[in-house]
Image (tube, rainbow, N blue to C red):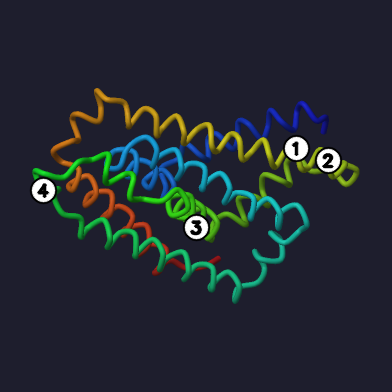
Amino acid sequence: MELLQAFLTVTVVHLLAAASPGPDFVMVSQQSLVHGRRAGLLCSLGIALGLSVHIVYSSIGMASLMSQSSGLLWVIKYLAAAYLIYLGIKGLRSRAASSTSEAPGEVLRRSAWKLVSMGFLCNAINPKAPLYFLSVFSLVLTPDMPPLQLAALGLWMMLLQFGWFSSVALLLSWPAVKRRFLRIGHWVDRVLGMVMLGFGLRLLFSRTN
């Protein structure tokens, strides 16, 4: 497969996958609506960086190994479920801000490292990722593909991921949108926390194939 065709294939498939509702989308939406643009963008960066984990093991054939190792897949599944449930419970416990609190101060107290780490973990421990990346890489990889081209494809996927979720963060943190959520931020936290909790519970009790 020619390099240009490989890039086009990866672009279409990965954007469709990124746009599908999932824990990454819920996290970026929650952080953008409740804590502002900075939080949403930093979480988006963490999610994009989390792809590097999947890209590395996929490029060296680990995705195939993980898809065949039920024990390893179960460990990843439970780690991911526990983290999603933790995020969900945290959202459900959100309280209304006091009348004297300022939204910008709340954002500043969240360190960049914490926000990036949240996004990174949300993506990196996704137990469905090994099979997804195995499928994508099977479409575009050839035995004679140079390592530099493979690295370029991986970097492109990370840029696509960051571009999509950054767009989501910018849209949801737009002042016109933010104003509508200013008084109901804790309810946004609770609703999205419930969604995140649902993802975690569904993953916890689902069968690992």
Residue drawn at point x = 68 percent, y = 50 percent: 55
Residue 76 occupies which quadrant of the picture? bottom right
49 to the left or right of 155 = left
Q: Mark 1: few, some, or many residues within 10 Å (few <14, many ≥20)?
A: few
| Mark closest to the chain's N terminus, 1 or 4 | 4
Q: Which residue is mark 2?
A: 148
Residue drawn at point x = 78 percent, y = 57 percent: 60
Q: Mark 1 to mark 4: distance in Å? A: 48 Å
Label 3 secondary element:
helix
Q: Position of residue 200 (x, y in %)?
A: 37, 62
Residue drawn at point x = 22 percent, y = 58 percent: 92
Q: Mark 3 to mark 4: distance in Å? A: 30 Å
Q: Mark 2 to mark 4: distance in Å? A: 53 Å
Q: Which residue is mark 4?
A: 98
Q: Mark 4: few, some, or many residues within 10 Å (few <14, many ≥20)?
A: few
Q: Report the front residue among 20 and 103.
A: 103
* Quarter that holds the C terminus: bottom right
Q: Which residue is mark 1?
A: 152
Q: Mark 3 to mark 1: distance in Å? A: 23 Å
Amino acid type at mark 4: Ser
Residue 29, relative to residue 53: is it above or below? Answer: above
159 to the left or right of 146 = left
Residue 101 occupies which quadrant of the picture? top left
Q: Which residue is mark 3?
A: 121
Q: Are marks 1 and 2 in contact (CB under 8 Å)?
A: yes
Q: Mark 2: few, some, or many residues within 10 Å (few <14, many ≥20)?
A: few
Tag nearer the camera, 2 or 4: 4
* Quarter that holds the N terminus: top right
Amino acid type at mark 1: Ala
Residue drawn at point x = 50 percent, y = 67 percent: 77
Amino acid type at mark 2: Leu
